[in-house]
Structure formats: structure tokens, C-alpha cells
Image (spheres, helix red, strand yellow):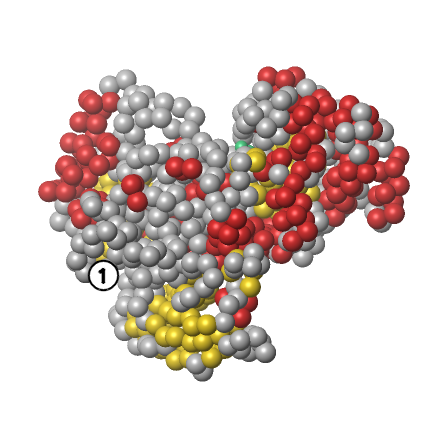
Amino acid sequence: MKEQELIALLNDLSLEEKVMQLVQLPGVAYESGAAVTGLLNDTAKARTLRLAGSTLGIWGAEKLNRLQRQYMENHPHHIPLLMMLDVIHGHKTVFPCPLGQGATFDPELTEQAAAVQAREAAADGIHVTFSPMADLSRDARWGRVMESTGEDKYLNGRMAAAMVRGYQGEDLKSGASVAACVKHFAAYGAAEAGRDYQNTELSEHTLREQYLPAYQCGVEAGARLVMSSFNTWDGVPSSANPWLMQTVLRQEMGFDGVVISDWNAVGELVPHGIARDEKEAALLAMRAGIDIDMCSGCYEKHLQELVEEGKVSRDMLDAAVLRVLKLKNELGLFEDPFHGANPEKAQAVLGAGEHRALARKAAAEALVLLKNEKEALPLKGKKIAFIGPYADEKHLQSAWAISTDREDSVTVWQAAREAFGQDAELRCAPGCLMLAEGTTTSLEVFTCPDAEKENARLLSEAKAAAAWADTVVLCLGEHFMQTGESASRVDIGLPEPQKRLLNALKPDCKCLATLIFCGRPLTLKEECDLSDALMICWLPGTEGGHGIMDVLTGHEAPSGKLPMSFPRHVGQEPLHYDQYMTGRPRPREGIGSFTSHYLDCPNDALYPFGFGLTYTDFRVSEIRLSGEALSQTSELTAAVTLTNIGKYAGTAVLQLYIRDLVGSRVRPVKELKGFRRITLRPGEEKEVVFAITEPMLRFWTINRRMESEPGDFQVWIGLDSTTENTAFFTLTDKD
Ligand code: BGC
């Protein structure tokens, strides 16, 4: 439809029809089989979809096409319904959870993965995905770190943009694309003490420098929607914050798409104590610039009245409705309300071989090898025992993989038998229950009638297998419901039965390689000390088993790097490498009394951001700068030679960090400004060149502007955030 036609349509709508374009109702209002992803208030079940402009949480081409037909027939202007879904790391074919994708440091791969997710979701009737989540995540206690690509704004920005490009493709109308929704705007990841939905306490400069950039990258990549967050910033919940939603998002970032609230976030303005009642909540949200009210019912019940009373202007209403109609138009729904979806296409596309092949590659690339002694990996021994609750576990996806079938997943044990053949000497034993009796996950409390007896039985079986084996591959981890929304934890260690299993098995193991499945950094000091090899597998997705075995057998070399620091102790959280400088830095040597430190724990991470081993070793040369000074308009290059000095082919992730030595505000100790994945054969070397330009040096200065300040800078290039390979340059004055 042309813009003029859209405006004509808008002008023809009744007030009720307009209001209802801004109302989103959950799929349960239409279908009993729909997924409920947030709190469901009783009225939602009873409401009809009659005129609501969008829905969420249902999928399936046949079902959605039927729904679309009925809906449009009943709609006075036959406007199509928008179908939204959380396709977070896969629809049918599931990729590693976003934190695992962060570990790949491979935005091209993430873009391809997003394109696959879009192809599957679109074929299955979906128009919009609530992804990417671009929330900076620095506190491992927060369950939703699993949905983010980590603690670094630059990496998150690259990944958010890649996801947006992948989901939306070249043309939103194509039946292979879905519109992307950047969320949760803003600073949702900074929840106090890592407790989900909590307040955030951030200065404007930290918000602007650290938290906003990744959302901005998603917006600049063309995301058609942005979701407001649950949390407050500066005392105001995002869904009632016009400064955030309009001044920052629309004016400064130039966002012209649809803003949708998070689930019931408009209604939550009441318990927040910002609105007296739901009517005032609707008013505040409209004034803040929330176009679609996701499932709270506040717009549905009160917006028409607010317009009639003149509290919400007709212009404001029309502008919001027009944005929703434009989105429908950009998706081509006025021409093809089914967006190319149909059951035959879905059947051909969902879980297609090439999608699974990409998921396998991504699962392998996401693996982060933290320790490898006694050359434990790749696997060499003849007799191998796969032990632990994750050894033959199919739930290798997060709780957000709502539209997949976990029976599609390949477990480590299945993949091992494929890899080594039926005649290989392999054994498998669960070793213990995944969780301790009484453990609370985000939705349930784990119970087992006679857990103690069951654990004792499983242990004796596992000990026999361990004593028999040359190598034990111990597959441990968090339950998939221990991360994600509403899954904050104060103890970020492995579940107790699994810790006991590791200790009990250790004396029986000749060689112990421990695999950790998780959606957050865990405290793994003991696991590391007791294991010969330790590898982080995240929640690896449908092809997890295959990806893991590709690496364990040496067909692929591990290449993932930590996207979040792994702490020594939970008390260090929030822990991130790019901390602001302090006046009392801890000295390198000695106790450092009256400096910034803990009495009972080092300051640094057990495993730092950017760290990950592979089967070979790399040498990085000193940095060669193309000059000593960078002007406001020129470019300085920083080059190193990377050499593979080991016995295996491997991939290194070279990382460029910069520090502004003196600024009008305190600067971080270092910040990631570039990275490059380089694959080399044994003995091979390559020159790698990074360009440094003035925009890379900008920050929120004392002038309250994003700008650079002339002066001296330090640059590092190395294999993780602790590299000491460094050089210096100067940014000269403005000409
Ligand atoms: C989550 C969002 C999600 C929405 C819709 C909310 O509970 O915070 O991330 O997109 O539900 O399912």
C-alpha cells in the first residue's frame, strides 16, 4: 500500500478500531495451546481478539492462516493481524543460546543463524520476533544473561546488528523474513543485585556510554520495533519515560518504528506506584510513546475514554496507529496477509538439513575451552565414559525455545556413538539427579520421591564406569530453567548433587574432561581444579551433541571466547573487565591495604572476558602502529603478526582494546574496540591490521556530549582482555 492509502485507511477507522490497533492480546485469547510467556491475568483469557491489532505466543502456519482469515473477515476494515513470537535462539532448529552465540565472536555466523530462524518462523506464520535482546549483562546472578551476548557493549552491538540483519533480510515482504524487535529498552540488564525486574541505579553517563550503544546498533541496523523494559531508570519505569522513549530513542537515535511495551509493563506502572490506576497507566504510557500495549489491557480498557476526554490527543493516537499500520504494510500484509506462510512450506523449511548443519557449526563455535592439561582433549583414550545428568539430556535449549521440539535434539551420548561407531568402547551413566530436592527453578520446585537413594544408586553405577574408562567426559550443568526470565540466583555454582558427583568420581578417573552446560557464568574453581580439561558448552541447541563431539574428537578446534567474566566468587558480581578507573587501584604485587580490593578474594576473574583456549598455541607479535598520532579525520593502523606455533590448525580471536589515559570523566581501564577471527594452519602466520579512528574514542564527556578528547591513549592487541601487549598513541587537537 502507498503511504497515502495507509493514511486514508487510518482516517477511515473508528476510534475503537484505532485504539485496538495498539492492543496486543496473548494467543490464549484465541487458542488454548498457545504459550504464555509472562504473567497472565484472568481477564486476558476471557477477552476476545475481535479487533486487537496483534497477538503473540502462537505459531503454526495452518493455525495462524486460519486465524488470519477469520480475523480479517470479522474486522470492519479487513486489516490483517500481526503475529509475534519470541524466537530467541531458534524456532524449530535451535542455535546456542545468545550468550553462547556471544562466545563465538562471529557476527557473520549469528547473522546466518538469525536468517535461518526467520525463515523457519516466517514459514510457520510469524511476522515479528522479540529479538535481539541487546541488554548489557554484567551480573551473572541475573538469569537473563543467557539471552544476552554478554558484558561488552561493542560485542553486543555487533551481535544485535547481525541479528537484526539476519531476521529482516533484504526485504521484509519476503516470506523468509521477520521484523526484529530490539529489547528491553533500556538498561534492563542492570537490575539491582541481579534480581529480575528490579530497579536500576545508573548515572546518565554509564547509561549512555555502556548501556545504550548496543540498542543503538540494533536500531541503526534497521530494527522495525523496540520493546520498553520492565525496570526503572532514574526513578521512572521505561514504559512511562518520555525522555528515554522519545528524546533518546526517537530523536537522538532516529528510531521511526513501533515501540511495544514488555508483557504487562503498562499495567505494572500501578504496582510501581507511578500510576494511581490502570487508566493513568495507559495515559502515562501513551505520553511516553508506547505504541502497543502488550497484554496489560490498559489501552483496551481506557485509551478510548482518554482520547474522548482529550487527555490523549487524536494526533498522538493517530501517529501511533500509523506506525503499526506501516509495519503491517512493510511486511506486505495488506497484499499477502499470510506473509507467504503455508503448511507445505513450513514442512519443507522447519528443521531443514542445512539449518541443522548451521546449528551444528554454531554449537561447535560457541564452545569455550578453559583448561586442557595432560592433553586430555581431543579425546584419545580407547574406553570413554560419558557421565553426568547432561550426558544423555535432550533439553539443550533455554526456556525461551518455546516453539521447538526437544525430541529433535542430539545428545552428547547419541553423538558420541555416531562419532566413534557402534563397536567403540563407550559407556554412559547419568551419575546423579540434575538438581537437589527442593531446588526452585523459574517455574517449579524440583522433587524426587527418594532422591538420596536414587543418587546413591546412580553414583555406584557411575563410579564403575569411571574406573573402567581411560577418559571420563563428565557432563554437568545448570537445569535449563535455572536461567532466563525470573531465574536470578545468589548461588551461581553447579547444583549440589553434581558437585558431589564430581568429588566422588575424581579418585576413579584416569583423565577427566568436564563439560559445563549453562546459561550464565558459574563459579567453577573447584570443578577446574579437579578436572584435566574444562569446557563451557552453554545451552548449545538442537545440534549440541554433534557440535560438542566435533570438538571433542578434534574434527573442529575449539574457538569460543568468554563473552562474560567467570568469577572466582559470586560476591565479585557484577564483575566485568571494563571497570572504571579508581583512585586506589590494587597494586600488582602485595596485599594493597587501603586500595580497592577484597580481603578474601582477588579482584580479577577466574577466567576473564575474551578468554578461551584451543588445541594449538598462538603467538602475537608486538604492535606496530602506523604513526604516533591520530588526527580527528585520519586513521591510525595497529598491526600484529599472528603465528600458529602449535601442532593443530586453530582459530584465534584477536582483540583490540583501548584506554583513554586522561579524560574529563573517569574512563574504563580498557574497552574492546575490535576483534577478528583468524584461522591458521600449524606454522602459518598472518598480519592482522586494525584501523583506529576518532569516533572509536568518543564517550559521554563532562560537556554531556558523545565526543572524543585529544590526549594520550593506550592500545592493546591480544588473545583476551588481560593481554599486556600494548602501545601508545595521541589524538591530536581539533584542526
Ligand atoms: C519478556 C520479554 C518477552 C515477552 C513476550 C516478557 O515476559 O520480558 O522478553 O519478549 O515476555 O513473551
As drawn, the residue found furthest toward the left would be: 507
Residue 691, image x and y in percent?
49, 74
Residue at the (21%, 55%) spot, across then down: 592
Residue depicted at x 35% and y 61%: 721
Report x, y in % for residue 504. Answer: 14, 37
Looking at the picture, which amino acid does disc 1 mark? Arg
Which SS class for mark 1? loop
Residue at x-position 59% and y-position 78%: 735
In front here: 291 or 514? 291
Give the image quarter of residue 265: top right
Q: Which residue is mark 1?
A: 588
- State the image coordinates of residue 460 (x, y, percent, origin top left): 15, 31
Q: Nearer the viewer, residue 352 or 137?
A: 137
Q: Residues within 10 Å of mark 1 (few under 14, many from 20)?
A: few
User: Which quadrant of the picture is home to ligand 1?
Assistant: top right
Instruction: Say which of 670 and 343 sits in front.
Output: 670
Front-lying residue, 439 or 657: 657
Residue at x 29% of width, y 41% of height:
571
Q: Is residue 489 left or right of residue 71?
A: left
From the viewer's perspective, tell me whether residue 397 is left or right of residue 281: left
Residue 425 position, x and y percent, is 21, 47
Res. 407 visible in picture: no
